[in-house]
């Protein structure tokens, strides 16, 4: 288990948002709140991974069963490894906009994989980049990650742009079973992240 998640104190519902939402964000960025997936989130999961546009480069389209399996896998990875592609919400409205987080890559070397999936209605607003930066900081400062891995479908130009903009270094192409293709793969060490942040 990598993390002991400290839920940030709930500030109450003075802003009118559902108390459940507000109280469950253990990580925040300027516009986004992060919590963990639960068994009750199938509708949110379907709204995200049930959209063929979202899963186009990650092995989709997904059937209802595949979306259920994906949700179950995220919940199980949190239990086994303390990592997850966390569901993210707009702080302003509580609306679910996607997920961003980590999964094990080379756990023995403390290398985690970073990923982000955003609902199509919210593309192009900088949410993936913002969420990724928050998760990267969390991975290095709270989880003691040594490095982060990221990969993308060879035709996913948006994802390529984001990982490069986030400071990741291309290392190699790696076979990705869900697409059956070799995906461009990248690494960013904690040291590189800190150098970038301070420079
Ligand atoms: C990839 C994805 C997460 C991007 O989310 P997003 O919130 O729209 O991304 P951002 O708004 O942070 O945009 C990041 C950059 O990509 C650029 N971009 C966004 N949409 C673009 C498009 N359709 N074509 C070209 N560039 C685009 C943005 O301009 C931005 O660059 P900039 O900051 O230099 O302007 C989203 O498209 C998605 O969920 N796709 C499906 C899942 C997926 O492929 N995930 C990645 C693999 S893990």
Image: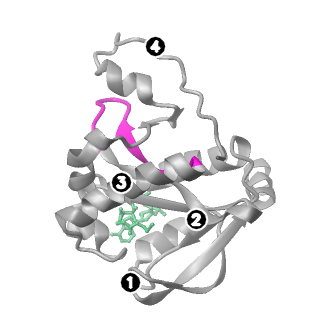
Q: Label 3 belongs to which residue?
A: 72
Contact check, label 4 and label 3, Cβ < 8 Å = no
Q: Label 2 belongs to which residue?
A: 165
Mark 1: C-beta under 8 Å from nearest atom of ligand 1? no
- Ligand 1 image-quadrant field: bottom left
Q: Helix, strand or loop at disc 4?
A: loop
* Horizontal relation, residue 163 to residue 55: left or right: right
Q: Give the mark nearer the N terminus: 2 vs 4.
A: 4
Foreground mark, 4 or 3, reads 3
Tell me where the magenta segment starts and ends, as one range.
82-96
Residue 126 appears in the figure: no
Q: Label 4 belongs to which residue?
A: 11
Mark 2: C-beta under 8 Å from nearest atom of ligand 1? yes
**How far from the left and from the top, in percent, is residue 77?**
50, 54
* Horizontal relation, residue 36 to residue 49: left or right: right
Foreground mark, 1 or 3, reads 3
């Amino acid at each position: 288990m990598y993390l002991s998640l400290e839920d940030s104190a709930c500030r109450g519902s003075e802003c009118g948002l559902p108390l459940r939402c507000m109280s469950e964000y253990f990580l925040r960025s300027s516009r986004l709140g992060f919590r963990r997936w639960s068994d009750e989130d199938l509708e949110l999961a379907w709204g995200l991974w049930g959209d063929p546009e979202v899963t186009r480069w990650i092995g989709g389209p997904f059937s209802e069963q595949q979306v259920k399996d994906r949700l179950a896998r995220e919940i199980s990875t949190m239990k086994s490894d303390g990592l997850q592609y966390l569901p993210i919400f707009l702080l302003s409205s509580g609306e679910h906009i996607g997920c961003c987080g980590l999964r094990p890559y080379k756990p023995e070397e403390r290398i985690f994989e970073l990923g982000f999936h955003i609902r199509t209605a919210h593309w192009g607003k900088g949410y993936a980049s913002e969420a990724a930066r928050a998760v990267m900081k969390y991975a290095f400062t709270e989880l003691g990650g040594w490095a982060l891995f990221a990969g993308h479908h060879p035709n996913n130009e948006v994802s390529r742009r984001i990982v490069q903009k986030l400071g990741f270094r291309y290392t190699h192409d790696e076979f990705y079973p869900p697409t059956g293709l070799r995906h461009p793969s990248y690494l960013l060490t904690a040291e590189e992240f800190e150098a970038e942040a301070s420079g």
